[in-house]
């Protein structure tokens, strides 16, 4: 009898099952400890970067939202698009997790500062579309004559542009991978996806977001942008209407790998058919989620949104709130997948996907409730849900960045050690 066969016979099924249960229990315990660590770190980062009592005070809120979305975009570029280039595979594999994570995260944060405060503020906004730059708007007078107004409007434009870039870049990766550049090296194939996502995002921005920006000036820039074509349906000229569906659509892209193990799109074997079906489906479902979310709000508050309404009845706030709730649910999904071993792991893929989705939806509601209840105490946010000077996206995106960085850059250190 071979040694391998002897070992197999000497280990009973009960012993194997017990060992597996011990391993799963250890993973869950380590994940819970890491989650507590990330929550404490999120509190510290919020105080330093965003809190009204902290040193930087970036929560205005558009400046804070713009910054964290820029960081998320750059991390997606670095990790998903360029595969950690220019860092070598050997360095990535052999470097200790704390050093690896600190170097990578510091690199991406510095690049994010460059994108937001040099590229947008000092280059693109000063020599091209001025609405991307607070200083550019100030130099032109008019709407931008007040520093706070100019900064907020410039950051709003950056939020919409960067969200479009993230969506179309991740959409390309999900439906096509690195095609048609998959045979090239990390940098070359990454550059292909980078520019593909960028071109699609610019085209979408011109149609979905730019008309709002052109018409928010006084007088409206009628020779620079078309009248927002969605006004009749959205009851507002605000491009939050499009933000309200593109964020849920992005969450569906994330959940494809995170919760659904590539299904149902992986069942389509023909690449171009899968690309068309997946693109059309996530966009339509994102729109359906937005409309459904608005209907739920109509029922919950027993009042429909109307043009000119105050915050709670303001259609633009309603569309944006759908995006906020979608990100709360995505935070719950990320916690489930990365800190609690993507439970449940038993049963068929369809049943697992449904249960994980339900857990994420309920978890998102719980996180939202805790945010609104504890935010004024822990974060210094404005009490209540419907506030003009408040958006949950600054915290949720920051929290997601910390969790994503912890799992991908720090490899689950110190309690998971992937």
Image (cartoon, grey):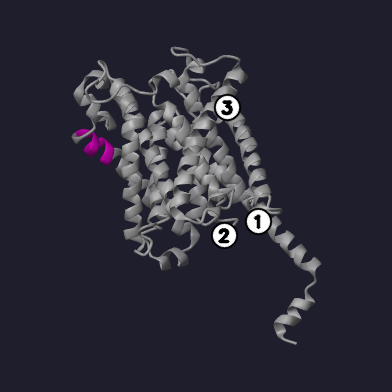
Task: Give the residue pinned by disc 2.
Answer: 417
Residue at 34% from the left image edge and 64% from the top image edge: 184
Q: Residues within 10 Å of mark 2 (few under 14, many from 20)?
A: few
Count of number-bearing discs: 3
Foreground pick, 51 / 234:
234
Q: Calculate the distance from the C-alpha at mark 3 to the C-alpha at mark 1.
A: 30 Å
Q: Residues within 10 Å of mark 3 (few under 14, many from 20)?
A: some
Q: Sequence-wise, which precedes: disc 3 or disc 1?
A: 1
Task: Give the residue pinned by disc 1.
Answer: 27
Residue 253 percent coordinates (x, y)? 50, 44
Q: Sequence-wise, which precedes: disc 3 or disc 2?
A: 3
Q: Is residue 366 magenta?
A: no
Foreground pick, 27 / 343:
343
Residue 398 percent coordinates (x, y)? 47, 39
Residue 65 percent coordinates (x, y)? 42, 33
Q: Which residues are magenta?
A: 118-126
Which type of secondary structure does the marked residue at label 2 adopt? loop
Residue at 35% from the left image edge and 64% from the top image edge: 185
Vertically, is 77 above or below 90? above
Q: Calculate the distance from the C-alpha at mark 2 to the C-alpha at mark 1.
A: 10 Å
Q: Main SS of the magenta segment?
A: helix
Q: From this viewpoint, is residue 47 visible?
A: no
């Amino acid at each position: 009898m071979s040694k391998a066969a002897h070992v197999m016979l000497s280990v009973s099924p009960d012993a194997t099952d017990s060992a597996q249960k011990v391993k799963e229990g250890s993973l869950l315990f380590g994940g819970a400890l890491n989650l507590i660590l990330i929550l404490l770190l999120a509190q510290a980062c919020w105080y330093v970067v965003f809190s009204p009592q902290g040193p930087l005070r970036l929560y205005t809120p558009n400046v804070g939202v713009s910054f964290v979305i820029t960081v998320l975009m750059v991390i997606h570029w670095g990790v998903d698009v360029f595969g950690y280039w220019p860092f070598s595979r050997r360095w990535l594999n052999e470097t200790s997790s704390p050093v690896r994570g600190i170097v990578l995260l510091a690199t991406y944060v510095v690049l994010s500062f460059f994108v937001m405060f040099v590229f947008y503020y000092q280059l693109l906004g000063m020599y091209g579309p001025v609405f991307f730059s607070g200083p550019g708007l100030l130099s032109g007078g008019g709407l931008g004559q007040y520093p706070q107004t100019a900064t907020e409007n410039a950051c709003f434009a950056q939020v919409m542009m960067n969200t479009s870039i993230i969506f179309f870049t991740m959409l390309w990766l999900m439906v096509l991978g690195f095609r048609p550049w998959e045979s090239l090296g990390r940098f070359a194939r990454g550059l292909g996806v980078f520019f593909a996502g960028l071109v699609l995002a610019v085209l979408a921005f011109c149609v979905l977001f730019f008309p709002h920006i052109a018409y928010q000036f006084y007088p409206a820039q009628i020779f620079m942008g078309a009248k927002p074509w969605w006004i009749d349906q959205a009851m507002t000229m605000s491009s939050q209407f499009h933000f309200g569906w593109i964020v849920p659509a992005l969450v569906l892209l994330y959940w494809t790998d995170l919760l659904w193990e590539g299904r149902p799109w992986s069942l389509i074997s023909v690449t171009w058919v899968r690309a068309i079906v997946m693109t059309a489906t996530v966009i339509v479902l994102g729109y359906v989620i937005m409309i459904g979310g608005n209907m739920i709000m109509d029922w919950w508050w027993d009042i429909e949104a109307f043009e000119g309404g105050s915050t709670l009845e303001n259609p633009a706030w309603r569309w944006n709130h759908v995006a906020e709730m979608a990100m709360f649910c995505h935070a719950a999904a990320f916690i489930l997948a990365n800190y609690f071993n993507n439970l449940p792991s038993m049963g068929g893929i369809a049943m697992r996907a449904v249960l994980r989705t339900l857990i994420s939806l309920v978890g998102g509601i719980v996180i939202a409730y805790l945010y609104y209840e504890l935010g004024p105490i822990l974060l210094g946010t404005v009490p209540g849900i419907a506030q003009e000077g408040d958006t949950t996206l600054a915290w949720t995106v920051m929290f997601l960045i910390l969790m994503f960085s912890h799992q991908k850059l720090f490899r689950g250190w110190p309690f998971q050690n992937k």
